[in-house]
Amino acid sequence: MQATASQSDPIISFRHVNKIYNNGTVGLKDINFDIPRGQFLVVVGLSGAGKSTLLRTINRMHEISSGEVLVDNESVSAYKGKSLRQLRRKIGMIFQNFNLVKRSTVEKNVLSGLVSYYPTWKCVLGLFSADDRKRAFQALTRVSLTKKIFARADELSGGQQQRVAIARALMQEPKIILADEPIASLDPRTTKAVMDTLQRLNREDGITVIVNLHSVELAQQYADRIVGLRAGELVYDEDIANVTTEALDHVYQTDSEV
Ligand SMILES: Nc1ncnc2c1ncn2[C@@H]1O[C@H](COP(=O)(O)OP(=O)(O)OP(=O)(O)O)[C@@H](O)[C@H]1O
């Protein structure tokens, strides 16, 4: 599938997106908004508000029930097989629990970001080209972790492991990074290192970054724009210049308080 987007088009658009889980739970309710290329967007909201669901509709980890999610002007629902793999290549994803192979080296974990480019057996046997190993080194340079390249992943701190996960995503040369609560299990110092790394990739490489966060303080510190979800609905959407703590508090009211 050929992307036909120009630089001024949004990189992602939500058009009347609804997601109802099989058990009837409403995940998302009539979501409508655009994300411009190169934005650092933070999504906030109470636990269960729909933040993870929203993020996962972008790379089709979750299927939507109705509406449209567009990436580069193409509806992601239309992608199948090879084209779906290509869509997922341009979207890196970072998880709260890092999703590393803990007994493998940092280098092998980073190289596994190429899994959609290599046959699985080559990945399992670790048969990567010298060129790709060079790229893995460069990706680790971007997250300031080259010294740990031959360490086992489980020898690293949580923050370092998350930066390995970011380096792994960089191997895909992503246009978009989705980060689902990337700092939820980290202490304040390592949180800063991870958020600073995401900010650097956004500013220096122009990668569009979308981060789900519980912390309003961090959201205000890093975001270009904050959107807020409550019970699957978009209830807040402001550029950072217009964000006020009082208005954000409204996002965190429970249904009985609204
Ligand atoms: N696989 C699923 N099946 C049924 N309901 C689900 C499923 N995944 C999520 N939900 C429900 O959908 C709603 C939105 O969940 P989601 O995980 O997107 O929220 P969240 O804002 O990311 O929460 P948290 O901050 O706790 O991660 C919640 O009510 C949740 O219980």
Image (tube, rainbow, N blue to C red):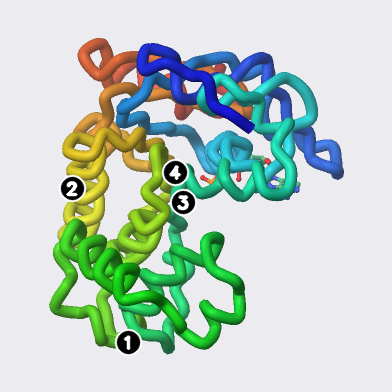
- Which numbered dot is residue 196? 2
The image quadrant that residue 247 belongs to is top left
Other residues around mark 3 within 10 Å, as few (<14) / some (14–19) / many (≥20): many
Q: Is residue 91 left or right of residue 14?
A: left
Which of marks 1 and 3 precedes in the sequence?
Answer: 3
Give the crowd class for mark 1: few <14, some 14-19, many >=20 residues within 10 Å: some
**Mark in front: 2 vs 1:** 1
Vertically, is 117 above or below 64? below
Q: CA distance from mark 2 to mark 1?
A: 24 Å
Q: Amino acid at mark 4?
A: Leu
Confirm whether residue 11 shows in the render: yes
Mark 3–mark 1 distance (CA, rounded to whole Å): 21 Å
The residue that disc 1 covers is: 152
Q: Residue at x 48, y 44 (%)?
A: 91
- Residue 112 percent coordinates (x, y): 45, 70
Could you say where residue 4 lies in the image, as x and y percent from the top left?
52, 20
Residue type (three-letter) at the residue carrying disc 1: Arg
Q: Is residue 249 above or below residue 196?
A: above
**CA distance separating discs 3 and 2:** 17 Å
Q: Quadrant of the C terminus?
A: top right
Q: Which residue is mark 3?
A: 93
Q: Secondary structure at mark 4?
A: strand
Split into quadrants, the picture shows ligand 1 in the one at top right
Find disc 4 in the rendering and name its residue: 178
- State yes or no: discs 4 and 3 in contact (Cβ < 8 Å): yes
146 sits to left or right of 129 = left
- Residue 73: quadrant of the picture: top right
Query: Which one is nearer the viewer's eye here, 6 or 166?
Result: 6
